[in-house]
Image (cartoon, rainbow, N blue to C red):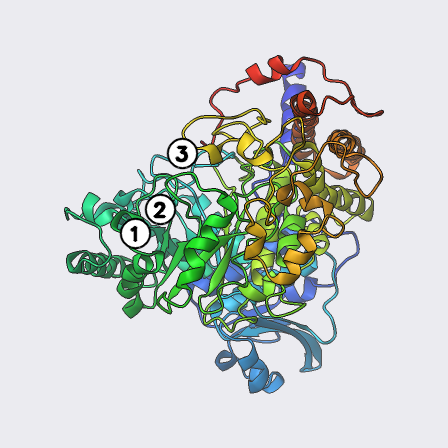
C-alpha cells in the first residue's frame, strides 16, 4: 500500500474509533475517571437468581457496563460466582442473604416494580444487594446501580429504594403501517412490518432496553389516527413477535383501535356501541388478540376528532363508546385509554372549552378499567399552555397525562428544546380543586382523588435516525419523560444533569454550562415563537415555521387568526367572562388569579386576555415592546447557545459535537425567521416602531408569507 493511502486509511480508522453517532443514547458506559474503582469489585463478582430471559439481560448488561467502565475483559467465571459474590441480584426466595438483610415489610412496600439497593457486610466482606418482588424490578435496580457507577456516585450508606408513582408508563408511537410517522422528525418508523414476524431487528431489543433503563413499561406501537388493519390476524402475528421481544424487559404492548373497525374489517353495517352485534364483535376480536398476546395491555382510542370515527356518529356519549371496548378487555385484565382530545365537528366558540364540556358531564359513567387520556393543555401541545381544565374536574374517572415528546410545535428535530421544564411546569401547577396544593401531579398519581389506576403517556420522538431522535439533545426529552413517568415530582434540573453525565461526561466544566443551556432552552423557544401567551401561530398543517397570517380554510380553529385575534385595537384571546369564559372551567381561585390583569402570570397573558398594544406590562414596557423584546431575547439566546456549545468541543466526541453545532446554527437562523416574520405581521396592526435593541427584518412581510417549505416530514 502506498504511504499516502496508508496514512488516509489510518486517519479513517482513528476517526472511526472516536466516532459516536449517538445510537447508545444514555447507555454509553464510557470509561470511568482514572482511579475510580468504586464499583469494580462488585460488578466483577456477581450472582443473580435463576436463569431466565430477564436474568440473562441483567447479566449481559453488567458485562457490557463493566467492559466499558474499566476497559478490561469481564471475568466471565465470576458472572455466576457461587463462592464469594460481591453483588447479589435476586428475588427474596432466591437468596438467603436477601431474606437475612431485608425485612418482609420493606419488601412489601416495593410493590411489583420497586427495587432496593443495599450495602451489607457478610463473610467478612462488603456486598451489595439488589432485590424486589419481580425480575423486572431487579432489572430496574440493575440499571440504577450502573447509572450510579457511570456518574461516579457513591452508594448511600442507607441504600436506595425506588418505587414508581405511576403504574403504567407508556410511549405512544404515532407510527403508520407504511412506516411513515405522523409528527415524526427522526426518520421512518422503526417497526418494519414487512419483515415481521420472521425477523426481530436488533433495534427492537435496543429500544426495549433503553425504555427499561428509565422505567417505561408500555408502548402503543401504532398511530392514534388508527388503521383497522392492525387488528387483523396477519398484523396480530407481527405484533405478537414484538410483544415476545419486549416481555423480558417488562414492556407491554397496547394497540390503537379504530372505532369503525367492526365495519371496516368485520363486515358489520354499523359500529354503534349499543348494538349487540358490535359488542360481540369487539369481544371476539379481543379474545383473538389475547390468544396471540397473553399480556396485551389494552386499547388506546382517538374518537370524534379530526376525522376519526366515534360515538358521535351514533349520538352516543364518549363513555358509551369507551365502555364497549372496556367490557371486551375486562376479562383479560386489559384497560382502555380513551383520549379526551375531542372537539366538535363544527368549529366551536372556543376550542379550549370542548374537551371539558364533553367529558365533565359524564364523570363516573366510564367502566372501572377506562382511563381518560388528557393532553397537558386544552389546545394542542403548544410551546406553552396553561394546564388542561379537566385535571381536577373528574374525581370519579381516572385521568392520565399525555405529553408530546416529539416537537410538533417546537421546531421539529433541529431546535434544541429541553422539555422537562415545561412538563414540570404543568405537573406542579396547582388546580386548587381541593384547596392549595392540589397539583396536577397529585391528580395523575391518583392521590388527590384516590384513582384506582394511574398512567402517563408520551408521544414518542423515535425514528430510524442512528441517534434515534434526530437531534442528539432530544434524547434528553425521552429520558426525562421516563423519569417523570416513574416519579412526576422529579426536578427537571436533576434530570438534565443526570442525562448529561450518562450521555457525555461527568466533567463539571461541561455539565454545568450545558445544563444551564438546557434548562433555559424551552423558555428560549417560547420567546422566539409564542411569547406572553400567544399560541397556535405556526404555519398551516405541517406547523413548521411561523404563520401568524394563516386564516380561512376548512375550520376556523385550525388557523392562527382564530387564536391571536390581532387588530389595530390589540391582540389576544379573551377567555374571561367578557369573552368565551373558558376561565369558568377552572377552580374559583384560578379564575380569580388569571382573570385579573394584576395577578395573572404574564406567560399566560394573551392566552386569556385581549389587550391593546399600548397595555403596560409589569416591567414598564408596552405590550408591543414587550412582545418584540421577547422575540429578540429568544434570538440572542439561540446565538449564545452556539457560543456555549463551541466552548464544549474539548469534552465531546467530534461527531456528536459537529452534529449538534450544525443544528444549533439552523435553530439560530430560524429564530430570526420567527422574529422577523411575526413582528412584521403584528406590526401592521400595532403601527408602532420596533423598540431599541430589536433587530430589523431583512425582508418585507410578503417575502415571509411566500415561504413554503416543501415536503416537511411528519404530516
| CA distance for labels 2 and 3 | 23 Å
Image quadrant holding the N terminus, namely top right
Structural crowding at the residue carrying mark 2, measured as other residues with C-alpha within 10 Å and reported as few (<14), some (14–19) or many (≥20): many
Residue 30, disc: none
Residue at 43% x, 32% y: name it. Answer: 555
Q: Earlier in the sequence, mark 2 or mark 3?
A: 3
Quick check: 338 left or right of 613?
left
| Residue at numbered disc 3 | 180
| CA distance for labels 1 and 2 | 7 Å
Quick check: 272 left or right of 1?
left
Name the one closer to the observer, 305 or 446: 305
Picture quadrant where residue 165 is located: bottom right
Q: Earlier in the sequence, mark 1 or mark 2?
A: 2
Picture quadrant where residue 87 is located: bottom right
- Pointer 3 with pointer 1, Cβ within 8 A: no
Name the one closer to the observer, 45 or 307: 307
Structural crowding at the residue carrying mark 1, measured as other residues with C-alpha within 10 Å and reported as few (<14), some (14–19) or many (≥20): many
Residue 311, disc: 1
> Is disc 2 placed on a helix, strand or loop?
loop
- In the rendered image, residue 238, in percent from the top left (x then y), is placed at 30, 47
Residue 304, disc: 2
Q: Earlier in the sequence, mark 3 or mark 1?
A: 3
- In the rendered image, residue 31, in percent from the top left (x then y), is placed at 70, 49
Q: From where the camera sits, is residue 232 visible?
A: no
- In the rendered image, residue 483, in percent from the top left (x then y), is placed at 60, 57
Say above or below: 582 vs 676: below
> Is disc 3 placed on a helix, strand or loop?
loop
Amino acid at each position: 500500500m502506498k504511504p499516502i493511502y496508508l496514512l488516509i486509511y489510518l486517519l479513517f480508522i482513528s476517526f472511526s474509533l472516536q466516532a459516536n453517532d449517538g445510537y447508545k443514547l444514555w447507555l454509553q458506559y464510557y470509561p470511568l475517571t482514572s482511579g475510580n474503582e468504586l464499583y469494580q469489585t462488585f460488578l466483577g463478582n456477581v450472582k443473580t437468581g435463576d436463569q431466565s430471559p430477564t436474568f440473562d439481560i441483567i447479566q449481559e448488561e453488567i458485562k457490557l457496563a463493566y467492559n466499558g467502565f474499566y476497559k478490561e475483559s469481564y471475568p466471565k467465571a465470576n458472572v455466576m460466582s457461587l463462592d464469594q459474590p460481591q453483588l447479589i441480584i435476586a428475588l427474596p426466595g432466591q437468596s438467603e442473604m436477601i431474606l437475612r438483610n431485608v425485612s418482609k415489610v420493606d419488601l412489601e412496600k416495593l410493590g411489583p416494580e420497586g427495587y432496593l439497593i443495599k450495602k451489607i457486610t457478610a463473610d467478612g466482606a462488603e456486598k451489595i444487594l439488589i432485590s424486589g418482588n419481580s425480575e423486572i424490578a431487579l432489572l430496574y435496580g440493575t440499571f440504577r446501580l450502573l447509572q450510579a457507577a457511570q456518574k461516579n456516585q457513591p452508594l448511600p450508606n442507607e441504600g436506595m429504594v425506588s418505587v414508581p408513582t405511576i403504574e403504567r408508563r407508556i410511549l405512544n408511537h404515532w407510527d403508520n403501517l407504511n412506516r411513515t410517522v405522523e409528527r415524526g422528525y427522526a426518520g421512518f418508523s422503526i417497526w418494519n412490518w414487512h419483515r415481521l414476524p420472521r425477523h426481530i431487528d436488533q433495534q427492537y431489543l435496543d429500544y426495549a432496553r433503553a425504555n427499561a433503563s428509565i422505567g417505561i413499561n408500555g408502548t402503543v406501537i401504532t398511530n392514534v389516527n388508527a388503521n383497522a388493519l392492525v387488528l387483523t390476524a396477519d398484523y396480530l402475528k407481527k405484533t405478537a413477535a414484538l410483544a415476545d421481544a419486549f416481555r423480558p424487559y417488562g414492556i407491554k404492548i397496547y394497540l390503537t383501535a379504530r372505532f369503525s373497525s367492526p365495519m371496516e374489517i368485520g363486515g358489520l353495517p354499523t359500529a354503534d356501541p349499543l348494538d349487540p352485534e358490535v359488542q360481540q364483535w369487539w369481544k371476539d376480536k379481543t379474545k383473538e388478540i389475547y390468544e396471540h398476546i397473553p399480556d396485551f395491555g389494552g386499547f388506546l382510542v382517538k374518537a370524534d376528532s379530526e376525522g376519526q370515527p366515534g360515538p358521535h356518529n351514533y349520538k352516543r356519549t364518549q363513555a358509551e363508546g369507551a365502555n364497549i371496548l372496556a367490557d371486551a378487555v375486562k376479562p383479560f385484565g386489559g384497560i382502555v385509554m380513551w383520549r379526551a382530545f375531542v372537539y366538535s365537528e363544527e368549529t366551536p366558540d372556543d376550542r379550549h372549552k370542548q374537551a371539558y364540556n364533553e367529558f365533565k358531564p359524564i364523570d363516573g359513567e366510564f367502566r372501572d378499567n377506562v382511563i381518560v387520556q388528557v393532553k397537558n393543555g386544552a389546545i394542542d401541545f403548544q410551546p406553552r399552555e396553561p394546564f388542561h381544565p379537566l385535571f381536577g374536574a373528574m374525581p370519579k374517572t381516572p385521568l392520565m397525562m399525555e405529553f408530546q415528546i416529539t416537537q410538533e410545535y417546537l421546531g421539529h428535530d433541529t431546535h434544541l428544546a429541553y422539555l422537562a421544564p415545561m412538563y414540570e411546569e404543568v405537573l406542579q401547577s396547582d388546580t386548587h380543586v381541593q384547596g392549595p396544593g392540589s397539583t396536577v401531579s397529585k391528580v395523575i398519581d391518583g392521590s388527590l382523588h384516590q384513582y384506582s389506576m394511574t398512567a402517563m403517556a408520551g408521544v414518542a420522538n423515535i425514528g430510524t435516525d442512528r441517534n434515534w431522535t434526530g437531534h442528539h439533545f432530544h434524547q434528553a426529552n425521552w429520558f426525562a419523560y421516563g423519569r417523570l413517568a416513574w416519579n412526576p415530582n422529579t426536578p427537571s434540573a436533576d434530570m438534565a444533569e443526570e442525562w448529561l453525565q450518562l450521555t457525555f461526561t461527568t466533567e463539571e466544566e461541561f455539565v454545568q454550562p450545558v445544563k444551564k443551556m438546557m434548562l433555559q432552552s424551552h423558555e428560549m423557544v417560547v420567546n422566539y415563537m409564542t411569547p406572553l401567551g400567544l399560541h397556535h401561530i405556526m404555519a398551516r398543517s405541517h406547523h413548521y415555521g411561523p404563520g401568524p397570517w394563516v386564516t380561512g380554510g376548512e375550520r376556523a380553529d385550525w388557523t392562527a387568526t382564530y387564536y391571536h385575534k390581532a387588530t389595530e385595537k390589540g391582540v389576544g384571546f379573551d377567555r374571561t367572562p367578557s369573552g368565551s369564559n373558558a376561565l369558568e372551567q377552572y377552580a374559583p381561585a384560578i379564575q380569580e388569579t388569571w382573570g385579573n390583569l394584576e395577578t395573572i402570570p404574564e406567560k399566560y397573558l394573551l392566552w386569556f386576555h385581549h389587550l391593546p398594544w399600548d397595555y403596560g406590562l409589569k416591567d414598564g414596557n408596552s405590550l408591543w415592546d414587550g412582545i418584540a423584546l421577547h422575540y429578540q431575547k429568544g434570538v440572542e439566546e439561540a446565538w449564545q447557545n452556539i457560543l456555549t456549545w463551541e466552548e464544549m468541543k474539548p469534552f465531546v466526541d467530534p461527531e456528536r459535537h459537529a452534529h449538534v453545532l450544525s443544528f444549533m446554527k439552523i435553530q439560530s437562523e430560524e429564530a430570526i425567521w420567527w422574529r422577523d416574520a411575526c413582528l412584521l405581521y403584528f406590526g401592521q396592526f400595532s403601527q408602532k416602531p420596533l423598540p431599541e435593541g430589536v433587530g430589523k427584518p431583512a425582508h418585507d412581510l410578503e417575502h415571509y408569507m411566500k415561504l413554503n417549505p416543501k415536503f416537511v416530514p411528519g404530516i
